[in-house]
Image (cartoon, grey):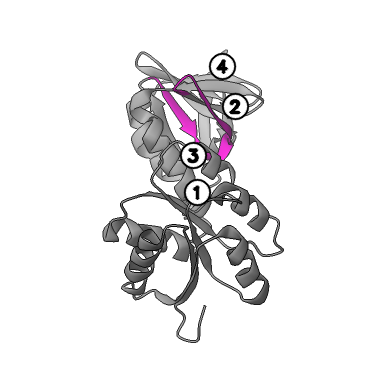
Amino acid sequence: MNRSGALRVLVIDDERPALDDLQFLLRQDTRVGDVLACDSATDALRVLRDQEVDCVFLDIQMPGLTGLELAQVLSRFRSPPPVVFVTAHDSYAVDAFELQAVDYVLKPVRADRLAEAVRRVVRRGGERPDAEQRGVQIPVERGGVTRFIERDEVTHVEAQGDYARLHTATDSYLVRTPLTALEEEWGPAGFVRIHRSLLVSLAHVKEVRMSGGRCSVVVGAGVELGVSRRHTRELRDLLLRRNGG
């Protein structure tokens, strides 16, 4: 950051009108100070060798080194700058998530959407659960014996009528609580609905897979869970937000 505490950002886009528009919008944000600009990934690397930036706003489809390839290079820096992808294509969001992008903004860029991306940069690291949301123990019954499991161990929750089945990496437990109640109560701890009968813990998501237009996530010890079309975009956005803030 510069002396005023404002962000110093680097904008990269091979299309001059898009580059100019993005610079203009960023300069309107009071949280942004210096705005550097490049029209190619190669020029950006030259800039980054000589100067430090707080964030990179990056197009994906560019001649030569693509935005995704540049982000892979940046990830190997000793102190990688946060990356926000700005693109006209929504088909690269899963790749962006795997590269731990802070955000994924679609063109044409709206000022309010860009402001949200800046907010995520400022709060990089994600919104972690409050202290009271960590270390919560859940009472479960089996064979007339009540035991307690850590909620942090739960990878996903499956609806079973008016009950819910909690899954961990090694076992599962039935509790007398409907899925809708758990969704409301556990939402602040990072549990989100991915299907009408499934909640998943974002902390336990290892992979996001896209095949034939269908989305799924892998949790725990390789368990693959299908994501409904209705929840795919929301889940993708939440995962990006969690990794980028």
Residue 125 in the image: state x and y as whole percent.
53, 57
Q: Which amino acid does label 1 sit on?
A: Ile
Q: Please report contact status of discs 2 and 1: CB closer than 8 Å, yes or no.
A: no
Sequence-wise, the earlier of marks 3 and 1 is 1
Question: In the structure shown, which secondary structural element does the residue marked by tag 1 occupy?
Answer: loop
Q: Residue 60 carries which label?
A: 1
Q: Mark 2 points at which residue?
A: 168
Sequence-wise, the earlier of marks 3 and 4 is 3
Residue 27 in the image: state x and y as whole percent.
35, 74
Q: Nearer the viewer, residue 125 or 70?
A: 70
Left or right: 129 as drawn, with respect to 171: left
Residue at point 62%, 29% (across, down): 220
Residue 79 part of the magenta-drawn span: no
Neighbourhood count class around disc 1 (C-alpha, 10 Å): few under 14, some 14–19, many 20 upward:
many
Neighbourhood count class around disc 4 (C-alpha, 10 Å): few under 14, some 14–19, many 20 upward:
few
Q: How far apart are marks 4 and 2 (CA)?
A: 15 Å
Which one is closest to the eye, mark 1 or mark 4? 1
Q: Which mark is residue 73?
A: none
Could you tell me if residue 100 is visible in this image? no
Q: Mark 4 points at which residue?
A: 142
Tell me where the magenta segment starts and ends, as one range. Answer: 197-214
Residue 239 in the image: state x and y as whole percent.
48, 42
Neighbourhood count class around disc 2 (C-alpha, 10 Å): few under 14, some 14–19, many 20 upward:
many
